[in-house]
């Protein structure tokens, strides 16, 4: 995900993005962080789970619209048509980078939860992400409001505004909510481990989004549909 650069043992750790896309994510998040976060505690994020879940599930119709062959995944060509339809002006290289970054199964097709993560990354990267109350950037104002909540949640967790969330920042965020509870550190570690996919001790926005879709139950949608098909 990123590399550590420092001079001597006492030097501050600086994370260097490994890809152009990650660098853009960090830059976009730092720009957005300048506006601050409306979140006051980790509990305030949890309380938004039901509304976020409903909003993201409503995105299923958008996914199905662009899944032209109805195989349950959006391939690279379908994604390019999706961007064209939504008037998202990204270069071929940027679309390729986004597709490869979000196709975590590396099966040349994005499933629903991967598609949601991609759209949220597009929301962060497109135009000026610091303009929180700007005119709709993707033509989906309701969904974009949900994406802004997710960006806001990450900004709340990223205490030092470097574009990443560390273990200590996660512990700090949980402790702000569960002051005095012995289990707070364990809760923070469990949540952090769910986010830190590459186990390098730092979480970027993409990793956070994939964990979040699991927390609110988006990963269960495919399982529910597969169960219905078997009945």
Image: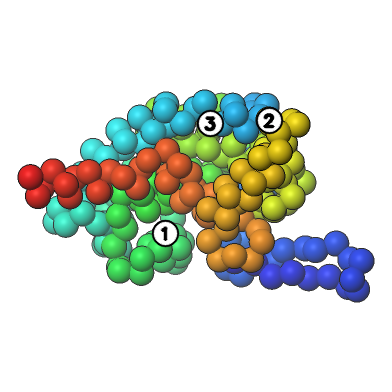
> Mark 2–mark 3 contact, CB under 8 Å?
no
What percent of the width, then of the height, locates residue 12? 85, 62
Q: Would you identify the image quadrant in which residue 142 lies?
A: top left
What percent of the width, then of the height, locates residue 128? 58, 41
What percent of the width, then of the height, locates residue 185? 69, 44
Question: Mark 3 sits on what residue?
Answer: 46
Question: Mark 1 sits on what residue?
Answer: 102
Residue furthest to the front: 182
Q: How dense is the environment of label 1, judged by Cα within 10 Å: few (below 14), some, or many (20 and up)?
A: many
CA gap, disc 2 and disc 3:
11 Å
Question: Mark 2 sits on what residue?
Answer: 177
CA gap, disc 1 and disc 2:
31 Å
Helix, strand or loop at disc 1? helix
What percent of the width, then of the height, locates residue 72? 21, 54
Q: How dense is the environment of label 3, judged by Cα within 10 Å: few (below 14), some, or many (20 and up)?
A: few
Q: Earlier in the sequence, mark 2 or mark 3?
A: 3
Q: How dense is the environment of label 2, judged by Cα within 10 Å: few (below 14), some, or many (20 and up)?
A: some
């Amino acid at each position: 995900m990123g590399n550590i650069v420092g001079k001597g043992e006492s030097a501050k750790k600086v994370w260097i993005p490994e890809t152009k896309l990650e660098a853009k994510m960090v830059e976009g998040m730092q720009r957005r962080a300048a506006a601050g976060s409306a979140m006051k505690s980790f509990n305030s994020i949890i309380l938004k789970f039901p509304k976020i879940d409903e909003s993201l599930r409503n995105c299923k119709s958008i996914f199905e619209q662009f899944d032209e062959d109805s195989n349950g995944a959006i391939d690279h060509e379908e994604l390019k048509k999706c961007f064209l339809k939504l008037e998202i002006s990204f270069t071929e290289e940027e679309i390729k980078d986004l597709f490869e970054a979000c196709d975590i199964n590396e099966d040349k097709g994005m499933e629903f939860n991967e598609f949601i993560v991609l759209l949220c990354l597009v929301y962060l990267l497109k135009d000026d992400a610091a303009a929180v109350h700007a005119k709709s950037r993707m033509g989906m104002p309701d969904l974009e409001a949900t994406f802004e909540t997710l960006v806001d949640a990450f900004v709340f967790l990223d205490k030092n505004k470097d574009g990443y969330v560390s273990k200590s920042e996660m512990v700090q965020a949980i402790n702000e909510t569960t002051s005095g509870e012995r289990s707070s550190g364990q809760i923070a570690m469990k949540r952090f481990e769910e986010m830190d996919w590459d186990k390098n001790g730092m979480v970027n926005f993409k990793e956070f989004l994939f964990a979040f879709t699991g927390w609110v139950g988006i990963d269960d949608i495919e399982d529910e549909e597969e169960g219905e098909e078997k009945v």
